Image (spheres, rainbow, N blue to C red):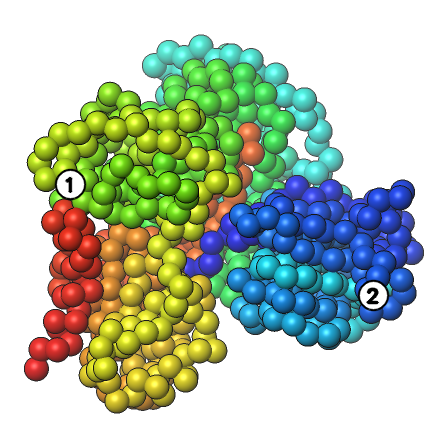
Amino acid sequence: MTKPLYRAAQACLFALPVLAQDVDTPFFNLDYEITVDKSKLPLSAHVWGKDYIVQTDATVAKSGTKSVLIQKNADNAQFGCIATAIPAVYEGQTILLTGWMKLEGVTDGNVGLLLRIDGANDILEFENMDAQGINGTSDWAKYEIELPLPKDAQTIYVGALNGGSGKLWVDDLKISIDGKDISKATKKVVVELPAQKDKEFDGGSKINAITLTPQKTQDLKVLGLVWGYLKYYHPAIAAGNHNWDYELFRIVPKVLEAKNAAQRDAALLAWAKALGPFEKAPVVKSENVKLSPDLDWITTSGLSPELSTLLTDLKSATRTGSHYYIGLAESVQNPEFKNENPYKDMDFADAGYRLLGLYRYWNIIQYYFPNRHLIGEDWKGVLEEFIPKFVNVKTEKDYKLAALELIGRINDTHANVYGDPTIEEIRGNRFAAEIVAFTEGKPVVTRFMSRDGASVLQKGDVITAINGTPVDKLVQERLKYNPASNQPTKMRNIARALLRSNNNTLTVDYTRNGKPFKATLPTYTKDEIDLKLLSQKKDTCFKMLSPKIAYMYPGTIKNEYIPQFFEDIKNTDGLVIDLRCYPSDFIVLAVGEMIAKGSTEFVKWSNPSITTPGEFSVIPYMELQGRNNYKGKVVVLVNEVTQSMAEYSALTFRAVGAKIVGSTTSGADGNISPFYLPGNVYTVISGIGVYYPDGGETQRVGIVPDIEVKPTVKGITDGRDEVLEKAVEFINKK
């Protein structure tokens, strides 16, 4: 239920190099007085975004002689961002960024200071002031952002962002840690762990090829099970005493050399014993366990008695809440995957690294996926099935497709491969302007992305073939590469990519009113087309459907609008909340309190364990304190686009009395937990379990409507919103 990770300012900073400097006398040029040679780019700063002027301005300054100007330079510009990367070598609890901004005619977007804190492989904290809606025209004013400073922070990014039209000037940034200027802040005592000192396989795993037989496949399955179990259960690995990726490369040749299961187990036993002895502690039974570790394989896989005994004893090893590879987020307690090297320069011909990709993903799901019990098949069988898929591929494309197929097997709509150029090229880097959705089992044209010229297609046209291939065949080919929690959401994802291509045109066969036609459609790059329409954004978040029925669109909402909105509609008969979108703000409490009539239980969560990997326990239910401000009927509209925070909102509003109208949602709730696979493959999972107050599942099930209504081809052709019509009918019914 977190906001999407790929917000503009976040995505722009993934590859910033850290400023080289003497950290004893930090100089970051945050007053932007020094430029690079004779250019207008400030020394140490980096420019990100597209089609914005970002440069020093010697005619406007808060102090000194220069500031930085960020100004839109093209109609289709995305954002302009200036940022400085600073090593996170300081002790402290909080970090404060202050700075001065001057605005002139900023519209169609907001501006703000930017503060982002990164760990080894992911974003730990982020703020860009977008929620404050800073725009318009104003003279120099001081702004600030304060965030927690995580202990495992590695890089701090500071700067400013302009996401609209008009001009933004920024000057005199300052950083304080626990109230002290960064120049006087206490520095960390950095201790390099043995896992970080191990560099033996930086240049490759030295495992160039693996010849599989049925026995070798079984041996590699056992290795994958043991490797992951030791990773999360053994105290020596938790302490950072071993680079566990590289230990895999050391043991694989020994397993492959084994002539039988006995020799394999002997090699594994010696390997595990070499990690050293461990202390044992009495096993304390956890309360409210929702999901228990899946460890029966230790005694049922035919392992040697000695290996099985060691692994069984390891269950009761003394473990703390600290682990080199895994942590829990401070607030929601979803897993945070640490020190998972993305291996950006991986050689895809390296069989060892490909096998590592499979083992890393499989074991993250085995021990830290809250919905493992809902996958729908034996997850250990999936490990065995995918060993040949990862071992036998040779190219980057085939490796990443194997990873995408594996990700699809956990049936989680959050899970996918994000921002990967290879996968994006497979899907097509160009887009037709027509948007289709599966309606009554058919891909139907529903909307059009804005661009010059008119489409030959019309709303309600049914696509039957693309470039001569029947749509039914394309769907079957693509199902395994479109991860989602349920079938409607898989079809949603397939529909979004049906009219993508790497060519300038594509041909479609289609029917209109039952008659067949053929057309050639032009395609466009992302810069030539309005991709925002894919997410169904609308211009306004509030309107009146009639004098007595109000409408709320959370896709463009801000919490600060809500009290006045409910004051304005307090005498209406009904309110429609259209959650066929992703909310732009966390409105659950602000709206829920207005609707609820008293204290209401609305959700339960389950959280993972560091000390008992694979276990998830349910925390007590959450309550919402209602104000009973709104007395009219409340109807929430949902469909397969309703996902994560939108589902959480719908779940809450139903609990406080709203009716749900539409079709089943995407079935993926809970804060996301991101990580990388080797080859710089970026993915996420749902990191906590989310349940109804009675314990009922939401994952894969979604929010099932009280009144089911789905669009029809005729309704789309006629320009009707049949789901909204049913909501209005319900409100008007006495």
- Decide if residue 167 is on the left or right side of residue 335: right
Check contact, mark 2 vs mark 1: CB within 8 A. no
Give the vertical position of 118 relative to 342 (above or below).
Answer: below
Q: Residues within 10 Å of mark 1 (few under 14, many from 20)?
A: few
Q: Position of residue 185 (x, y in %)?
A: 83, 65
Closer to us: 22 or 568: 568
Which circle marks residue 108 in the picture? Answer: none
Q: Relative to 574, is 555 above or below?
A: above
Residue at 20% across / 64% down in the picture?
Answer: 724
At 10% from the left and 33% from the top, the residue drawn is 515
Q: Quadrant of the C terminus?
A: bottom left
Question: Label 2 crowding class (10 Å Cα cut-off): few <14, some 14-19, many 20+?
Answer: many
- Which residue is under mark 1? 441
**Depth order, front residue of 249/594:** 594
The residue tagged 2 is 61
The image shows residue 580 at horizontal and vertical percentages of 30, 59
Q: Which residue corresponds to the image point at 22% horizontal and 77% vertical from the top-left?
A: 546
Disc 1 on helix, strand or loop?
loop
Residue 168 location, quadrant: bottom right
- Mark in front: 2 vs 1: 2
